[in-house]
Amino acid sequence: MIGRRSDKVVLVTGAGGFIGSHAVLEFVKRGWYVYALTHQHIPDWLDGLERKGNVSLLSGDICSYDSMHEVVVKCMTDANVPLTAIVHCAGRASDVGREVHFRKTNYESIQHLVKICLENEVGKFVFISTTDVYGMRDFSGEGESELAFDDKAKNFYPKYKILAEKWIELHMPKDKYCIVRPAAVWGDDDPTLTKRTVDFLRKSPIILHFGKWKGKNRWPLVHVDYLARAIFAAVSLCQANGQAFNVLESENVSIDGYYRMIAKRYMPEKHFRTIYLPMWVGILCGWIISTMSNILDLKKPFTDPSLYALYSISSNLDFSNAKCEELIKYIEPR
């Protein structure tokens, strides 16, 4: 049994990843005890938190019911209290890949975890989804109640996030879950979106924009620290029960503004020309890149833009974050 410092105990899956590791840190800062389920990568500072007694590192397979059931029982036995929540950050986040991987990791794992939560009386299940569930098209400030799933999504990432959300809503009481939908998550230690953008800008002397918006379309950003606070709110507040809410910053940043912010931050000495291309040129390039990446079963496209990324950076992804802003008020110091 651990020497518990708190009766508030949370299990975070994907704790070695970008979002999961920041969620762990947020809970620790607020005095919670965290069980951190990792797969491969374990940040050094996470090891340090375990040595300090704030965190227990665990391993398990989120795609296996037996493995996850064993993890949850271990947590509850070790802590000698019920789990306050499971925060499910683990999953496959990519714009390319074969369907079988997304179904297994992003959907079947949810079926297992929902059943385990209900069987073991876990306080709340918080699922990290994505604003991609609304589709890649032009929006104009719609609130969550006005937004609908893109049930015709062809990309496997949003397709199985949508199915996972529907499964949760169908099989769990409203007081037992919350769904968090982050937009484009970034941060200095981000090995995914931020690194991908930096790598592209370092290789390219130009900034490319496709289609009618010419780089002026909104790119919905959320810093990972703000997302971590939103996740804490989802777990700790009864007002979040049964809710699904968007997490993005209120400032309206264009895709061109995002590129230039990243360029200024990581390569201030470099100057870029801007080129505007017709959408059909991007679609042709994106289709070739995505098709080859899928044939090779890559975890990420071999270059940019993939077809899915093209639609993302060329759409006006402007929707409301009002629910999140209201929830965050309850956890901020007064």
Image (cartoon, helix red, strand yellow):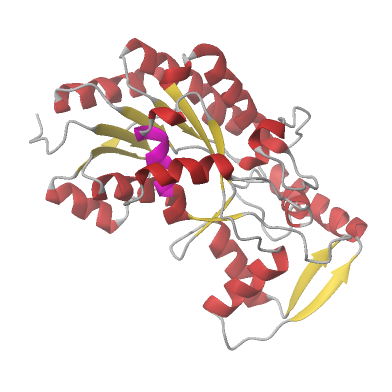
13 left or right of 172 in image: left
Pick the front one: 39 or 77:
77
Please tell me whether residue 102 is drawn above or below residue 136 in the rendered image: above
Can residue 147 be seen in the rendering of this structure? Answer: no
Farthest residue toward the front? 334
Number of numbered discs visible in the structure rendering: 0
* Image location (x, y in percent) of residue 325: 51, 46
Pick the front one: 276 or 289:
276
51 left or right of 284 in image: left
Task: Examine the structure image and report whether residue 92 is included in the region drawn in magenta.
Answer: no
Question: Residue at point 42% right, 19% down?
Answer: 175
Instruction: Provide the residue span drawn in magenta.
Output: 228-236
In terms of image quadrants, where is residue 55? top left
Magenta-colored segment: predominant secondary structure:
helix
202 left or right of 15 in image: right
Question: Residue at point 59% right, 62% down?
Answer: 196
Please tell me whether residue 334 is drawn above or below residue 235 in the rendered image: below
Farthest residue toward the bottom? 269
Can residue 50 be seen in the rendering of this structure? Answer: yes
* Image location (x, y in percent) of residue 231: 42, 41
Question: Residue at point 45% right, 24% down?
Answer: 177
Pick the front one: 67 or 132:
132
Question: Residue at point 57% right, 58% down?
Answer: 193
* Image location (x, y in percent) of residue 314: 79, 56
In terms of image quadrants, where is residue 58? top left
62 left or right of 55 in image: right
In terms of image quadrants, where is residue 74? top left
* Image location (x, y in percent) of residue 23: 37, 46
